[in-house]
Image: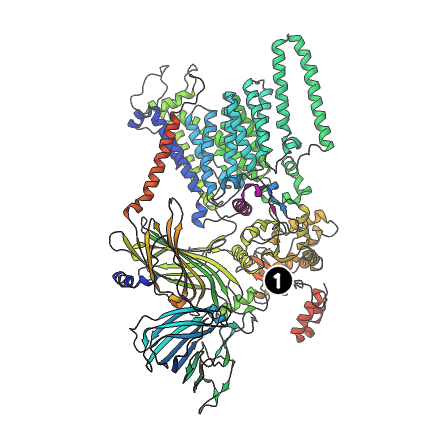
Amino acid sequence: MAVATATDSSSPMQTLADFGKSKSLRTLLRVLILCFIAGAAVSSRLFSVIRFESIIHEFDPWFNFRATKYLIANGFYDFWDWFDDRTWHPLGRVTGGTLYPGLMVTSETFASCWPPAFSGLTAFAAYLLTNEMTTNTSAGLLAAAFMGITPGYISRSVAGSYDNEAIAIFLLVFTFYLWIRALKLGSVLWGALCALFYGYMVASWGGYAFITCLVPLHAFVLICMGRYSTRLYVSYTTWYALGTLASMQIPFVGFLPVRTSEHMPALGIFGFLQLVAFIYYIRSSLSGAQFKAFLFVGLGAVFGLALLALVAMTSAGYIAPWSGRFYSLWDTGYAKIHIPIIASVSEHQPTAWPAFFFDLNLLIWLFPAGVYLCFQDLKDEHVFVVVYALFGSYFAGVMVRLMLTLTPIVCVAAAMAASQLLSTFLSVKSPVAKDPEQEDATDVSSKKIKQNAGSLRSTNSPYVGVYSFMSKGLVSGIMTIYLLLFVLHCTWVTSNAYSSPSVVLASRMPDGSQHIIDDYREAYQWLRQNTKEDAKIMSWWDYGYQIGGMADRPTLVDNNTWNNTHIATVGKAMSSSEEVSYPIMRQHEVDYVLVVFGGLLGYSGDDINKFLWMVRIAEGIWPDEVSERKFFTPRGEYRVDGEATETMKNSLMYKMSYYNYHTLFPPGQAQDRVRGVRLPDTGPVLNTLDEAFTSENWIIRIYKVKDLDNVGRDHAAAASFDRGHKKKKAIKKRGPRTLRVD
Amino acid sequence: MKSIAACAAVLLSLISPIVVADANVAAPSVSKVTLPSTFKPPQVFKNANLVHVISLEKNFAKEQINVVVENDSKEPQDEYFLPFTSQQMERVGGFEVKDRKDSSLTGFVVEAVEYDPLSDTQYYRIRLPAPLPPKAQQTIGISFHYLQALTPLPAAIEQTDKQYLVYSFSAYCPSIYTTVKQKTEVKLPGSDIPEYTKIAGSGDVKEFPQKSGAKLTYGPFPEVPAGAVSPVKVRYEFTKPVSHVTLLERDVEVSHWGGNIAFEERYTLYNQGANLSTLFNRVKWAQSQYFNPTSYALKEMKFPLRIGSTDAYFTDAIGNVSTSRFRSNKKEASLEIKPRYPVFGGWKYPFTIGWNADAKYFLRHKTGDSYILGIPFLEGPKQPEGFGYEQVLVRVLLPEGAGNVKFHTSIPESSITDVVVDQQKTYLDTIGRTVLTIKARNLHDDFRDRDLIVSYDYSLAASLRKPLVIFGSMMSLFVGTWLLSKVDVKLSSK
């Protein structure tokens, strides 16, 4: 709808065309269109609220929500010093120093519904940025419309995803706009504003490094192209000096900007710019031959020295080398081998190519055209688009999550291409001879269009145009259809793919009514109300934030994966046999263990399917005790049925998932609907844990860790005694089974 | 609807004893009498005949004492005292006194007597409408109930077991007066009564109680001196949830502009039945749901709401609960909710429900600036097994600027512990809304349709306050922006 409105701005109506001449009406129209776009952007993100409810859906946002609540309750200074003893039991987490506080400070009170509000601002920022690139204002409106509804950005900013990214993309685009503005004007004011918003961005999202790298890169490319100017010098140095200072105010960032490799390009270009400025100054006062000699000696020496210093400081440990996540950006296989914890997150996987089309639809093929258009009129800001497009594409190809950083530039470039196409073909007037004054009497509306179109062309170039009315109609018609299809696609993707909360599963009943499967919250609410306030819950780290937020209970590990060893400990407890796991759980004072099991419902995101990552992460720390190979059958299959390996069957995770499950079925018909296999008739035996709660559809299973035996027996003996005591006859029947000692 | 107004008009004339006069004056509750600590109730009455009925059909103990009192002294008397142990005082509620012969006779005043907080015997004082002349008789019916008086035995049972409760009481009705003739009847929910205390009989009955189906009868007993007790216990099957709400906060928000009344109720619900002896087993639960659905776990609640209620919701601390059904049509409005999990004994489930209703069903414009609001005091679930409330906090949020707040309720006066009128600020408020807060204790779901009638003054000027404030602030914003845009901040005159 918004797209239609955007193109409507040049709709041929007599009165409008006459009115259209006045500047104030154009402004009014532009403001109206932008408001409509903001409205469309916000409302398309409210699908989940309408379909489900206004809750926070995802995993990470629960932490943000909790942190915000803490901020409100305790104020800003306590927030910095917040030591959270309810996570990472028994270690705790220095939360104030390990988060990006921008989001919490921004939102304080309004919770789940505000990411959509920011999307309106992002659309506006895209409008501003595009207007810097081209004189054609309709391109800006198109860019705003694209930005407003493209699924690539919606995926992270739907209502209910209370996440850093929602606010960060607005800041990203706006910072870039301010940077272009500062560069164009060579203005300290705009440079300072840019630094301010950069500081805000740093406070909001770890992805600020993208700006930290892209702006210097842009500056570097400009210098290499021989486009050094005082404007560049002023804007870059202002931004760097103030921006770095601002970023260092965030405790989590602290001295990183001068100590890590990720921030080195910015610092290096800062130094390089001083050097270049100095050289330009020298050149203006020296003769040609002298200058050449000076250039070779001086520049070579400085560059060599700087490089040496960098290498020396890195090896001496003053500057930290690239972090793991950054390595995985260059070598996509790196993480899988060295840091399984990063690779285990689906967001960190390389992007599959259909995802580009899924998230960006027609923009993905308009995008190269837009970049090409930038080459036609290669000013400083167009160089920025080209550089951003190149790097954005690369990163988006490497990591699914970084599709988000690519989206703004795709919108900008695609809008440029689309508006170029439309303004060329929507001009009803055919170019007749060389007299642009002559009016086509058949259409009165051409005046306005001509104004739009005419401004793109330089007046002295030969007047080339489309003569046939047929081709004009065809191209603009097809383009309109594409735009409409884009809107349809965006709506469909948003409503179907990105608006289903992960906490709640929705399905359709035979009569078409919606059936909601709410097992997560059922179990979390049970934990919250019916366990001790300080009962420690062990679960895989994916659910850590949710347990902390919804169940309000301390957890061992959570989605802030700062301590790999601790996560590996949980992985080891889950993947080892009870005899090994029990002491680990006792040592960590675990009261309850929570597993996610989708076998009954066919919910594939369960713990058995994530199990191999737990094994891998545990193996990374204890290669002697946990071995991934042992979970595969000799034929290399990962099985959970009767043919599963002994290690698999004895692992705590397997036992907890399938404990008692077979009793739900008639003999011989127990089935796992996720793996699609039939399970053995005798279920696993648990000695050290008691089943405490199982949700309605068995998605969440909670086990209570048994206390030590009263008379000092080990749990296996005690449990088998209990079983024997209850069913004396059963012992005779299946004697060997009860005598088994694990 | 006219009946409500008419009824309200009548009731308004009765309001005077419990009026909270001015909007800013908070009058504390007056349902207590303070007497010197050496107080001993005078032995001026005699119970000529007494029938004590204890109903245990629901999950609280309901007692009814029908007694023929006779003035045993020389002067006319109008103060009848009823003794309770200090433990019972905590849990007793819903005191109502009627004349059994003449039901039109009103004016019985029931008040708790405060004299010595350390004494184990405490009293409720019943003031008769008219003093009883010497040797005259009056038949009065006293009804009240105890919450949390039933204890499960065994205290922990299996998920599919039957639940048994124990109730202890005295076979002789506790009284500080001599009782000439009395009997105690115990009504139970079923005939499965494995244990009950047997005492020696009198007259031609050898042993009490006499059991017939679900009813036990102790007595009739011959004359019993004042203060005599004979402790007995009864243990009976009650495989139903013992739902108990420790705190119910009920907010009623009146909006004149919106023509809407918004209700929101927050329950802190416990099941005080037997605990689980082994941990919860989903397989067994699913099977028992299929084969034998009676259970002592609370799995569903039904809220019959007033006709015309809309937009019902059911949430808890972590968001919407999808297992609810709401039906609203011209004949009924009913909200059926299921907790996220079956609430077993010892488990807790706090939740919130709310709904809207058109103000025309509840709000009447009387004369000039005064309005009358008539709402149910309590609208909790209607459960066959009963539903007890330990603390009830009803807050009526009247529009900003409402004053001269008076109320009347048909809830027993002795149950109301505190009444406050103050202000609360919400969105776009400048002086805050007038809030009438009524605290009550120890109620149960039999009181769910009792009325609460609030009258208040709300002038046109007060109702225009909010639009004017919004208009004024928007205008000042625009004027401010306009003024700002006039300021020239350029350094050069280019």
Position of A716 relative to B197 (above/below): above
Q: Where is residue B342 in the image (x, y as percent from the top left)?
A: 50, 63
Q: Is residue A130 visible?
A: yes
Magenta region includes residue A61? yes
- The structure residue drawn at horizontal position 31% and vertical position 19%, both measured from the top left corner, is A439
Q: Is residue A678 visible?
A: no
Position of A597 relative to A355 (above/below): below
Magenta region includes residue B318? no
Left or right: residue A119 compared with residue A740: left
Q: Where is residue A585 in the image (x, y as percent from the top left)?
A: 67, 56
Quarter of the image for residue B124 reads bottom left
Left or right: residue B454 compared with residue B54: left
Q: Quick one: quadrant of the C terminus of chain B?
A: top left
Task: Please name whichever residue, A519 or A435, is drawn nearer the observer in this view of the structure.
Answer: A519
Left or right: residue A207 compared with residue A44: right
Q: How is the image coloured?
A: rainbow
Q: Position of residue B141 (x, y in %)?
A: 36, 76
Dot 1: chain letter:
A
Quarter of the image for residue B382 reads bottom left
Residue, far bottom: B204
Main SS of the magenta part reads helix
Position of B417 relative to B132 (above/below): above
Q: Where is residue A147 in the image (x, y as percent from the top left)?
A: 46, 35
Residue hosting label 1: A659
Q: Which amino acid does label 1 sit on?
A: Tyr
Quarter of the image for residue B137 reads bottom left
The region drawn magenta spans A58-85
Task: Please name whichever residue, B390 or A201, is drawn nearer the observer in this view of the structure.
Answer: B390
> Could you say whether the residue bearing mark 1 is in a helix, strand or loop?
loop
Task: Please name whichever residue, A92 or A215, is drawn nearer the observer in this view of the structure.
Answer: A92
